[in-house]
């Protein structure tokens, strides 16, 4: 799987790979309000992205993100 | 009925433990599992754990019998007792090497014990306390000394070849929490060795009508190709319930033995993970009590945990001091704990 570059592709990947119901409207939703989102899904997401990119992800920086769009921004900055 | 304090004497004479091989740190665990080391640091907090099997090849290096026999031998030696002095064995585990013969009887054989009752309890985090509870009853029934043990091994339930990103979160969480280990204690009817009186034991099933918080499954010949997860932990239910249950256990124990919080010098809290234990201790908010925990350095070893804590407690337990141990088994929800006093 290629590393998702657009926000839309990232949201699609989160929905498909983590079995979460995620639509375009969820990009800016507070993660605390995202159904099914928790620290274990964060681990799966980080694992997926690290496997795809072959790079370590800064988990603390990802943790500061309050929404999927903000996580995507962190990833973009790492790219 | 809940079993609790009885007037007959039961004393911890000695404790022995066994952890296999070298500690596995988060960098190594993360690399072998293919998960983020930093995530483990942040969310689990545990620094190291031990495995009786090779994480790279899956090869089993030491069995549960090996670990329990080592712990038992250490406890016996430390108590200064011989095999002939031991009148019963109680061993608790969720992960026996074989269903039959029991791990308990294999351990008895290793230790040179013969012609005595040997019980095996199937349990998780409450197992060590259940073994202690049964051991007390056997002492009250006339035995002079006995050996209680607890331990678990993960070789059959963790598979590092799996892709963690595609595991259900309820299964994946187990990979970052657990490790292998065993512990043992010599119980005596009269003060001996460490001379720690067991003043009270709480052992109470509290799961009526509640879904299981932790499932440990197994496959047999007819379903060996099943896709059913071998482990499933409802970690949200555990995060929500265990701190409150720990408080209830603490107060129930205090009430039954007639102590106040000021009488308690040491607290042995539940050892789920470094982070969860810290949250539980904060929630319990027992003033000026010394915490005795091991999970940061041992991982969650299930049935072995209270023995690992007791081993850390004993050198610090001064004459007349008191300790309360609290464990919560989240499989089908069992409240257990014990009250100790050095005499």
Image: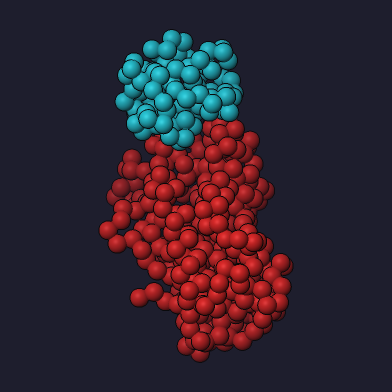
Chain colours: A cyan, B red
Q: Where A64 sits versus B158, above or below?
A: above
Q: Nearer the viewer, residue B67 or B179?
A: B179
Outermost residue to the top: A6
Q: Is residue B308 visible?
A: no
Q: Residue at x 42, y 42 (%)?
A: B171
Q: Residue at x 56, y 45 (%)?
A: B275
Q: Nearer the viewer, residue B25 or B318?
A: B318
Q: Is residue A72 visible?
A: yes
Query: Would residue B31 be found to the left or right of residue B238 on screen?
Result: right
Number of marks: 0
Quadrant into which the N terminus of chain B falls = bottom left
Residue B64 at x, y percent in the picture: 54, 59
Q: Where B15 sits versus B239, above or below?
A: below
Q: Residue at x 42, y 49 (%)?
A: B240
Residue B196 at x, y percent in the picture: 63, 77
Q: Residue at x 37, y 43 (%)?
A: B229
Outermost residue to the left: B209
Residue B290 at x, y percent in the picture: 65, 61
Q: Residue B32, located in which quarter of the rendered image? A: top right
Q: Residue B70, located in which quarter of the rendered image? A: bottom right
Q: Nearer the viewer, residue B123 or A59?
A: A59
Q: Nearer the viewer, residue B230 or B342?
A: B342
Q: Where B236 sits versus A58, above or below?
A: below
Query: Would residue A17 be found to the left or right of residue B139 on screen?
Result: left
Residue B166 at x, y percent in the picture: 41, 31
Q: Residue B343, located in which quarter of the rendered image? A: bottom right
Q: Where B43 sits versus B289, above or below?
A: above
């Amino acid at each position: 799987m290629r590393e998702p570059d657009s926000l839309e592709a990232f949201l699609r990947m989160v929905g498909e790979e983590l079995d979460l119901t995620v639509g375009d409207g969820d990009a800016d939703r507070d993660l605390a309000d995202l159904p099914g989102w928790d620290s274990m899904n964060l681990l799966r997401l980080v694992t997926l992205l690290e496997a795809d990119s072959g790079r370590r992800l800064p988990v603390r920086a990802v943790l500061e993100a309050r929404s999927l769009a903000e996580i995507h921004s962190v990833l973009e900055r790492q790219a | 009925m809940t079993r609790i304090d009885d007037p007959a004497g039961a004393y911890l004479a000695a404790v022995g433990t066994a952890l296999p091989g070298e500690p596995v740190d988060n960098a190594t665990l993360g690399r072998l599992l293919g998960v983020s080391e930093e995530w483990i640091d942040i969310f689990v907090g545990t620094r190291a754990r031990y495995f009786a099997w090779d994480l790279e090849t899956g090869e089993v290096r030491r069995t549960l019998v090996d670990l329990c026999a080592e712990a038992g031998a250490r406890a016996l030696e430390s108590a200064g007792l011989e095999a002939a002095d031991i009148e019963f064995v109680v061993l608790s585990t969720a992960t026996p090497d074989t269903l039959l013969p029991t791990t308990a009887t294999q351990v008895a054989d290793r230790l040179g014990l013969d012609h005595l009752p040997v019980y095996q309890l199937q349990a998780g985090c409450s197992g060590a306390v259940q073994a202690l509870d049964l051991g007390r009853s056997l002492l009250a029934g006339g035995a002079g000394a006995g050996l209680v043990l607890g331990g678990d091994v993960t070789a059959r339930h963790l598979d590092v070849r799996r892709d963690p990103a595609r595991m259900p979160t309820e299964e994946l969480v187990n990979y970052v929490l657990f490790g292998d280990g065993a512990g043992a204690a010599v119980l005596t009817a009269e003060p001996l060795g460490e001379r720690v009186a067991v003043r009270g034991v709480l052992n109470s099933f509290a799961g009526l009508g509640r879904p299981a918080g932790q499932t440990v499954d197994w496959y047999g010949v007819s379903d060996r190709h099943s896709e059913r997860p071998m482990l499933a932990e409802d970690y949200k239910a555990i995060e929500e319930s265990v701190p409150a249950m720990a408080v209830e256990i603490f107060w129930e124990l205090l009430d039954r033995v007639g102590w106040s919080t000021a009488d308690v010098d040491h607290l042995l809290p539940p050892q789920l993970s470094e982070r969860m234990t810290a949250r539980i201790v904060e929630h319990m908010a027992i003033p000026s009590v010394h915490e005795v925990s091991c999970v940061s350095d041992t991982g969650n070893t299930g049935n072995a945990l209270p023995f690992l804590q007791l081993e850390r407690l004993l050198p610090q337990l001064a004459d007349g001091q008191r300790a309360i141990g609290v464990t919560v088994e989240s499989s089908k929800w069992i409240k257990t704990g014990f009250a100790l006093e050095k005499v």
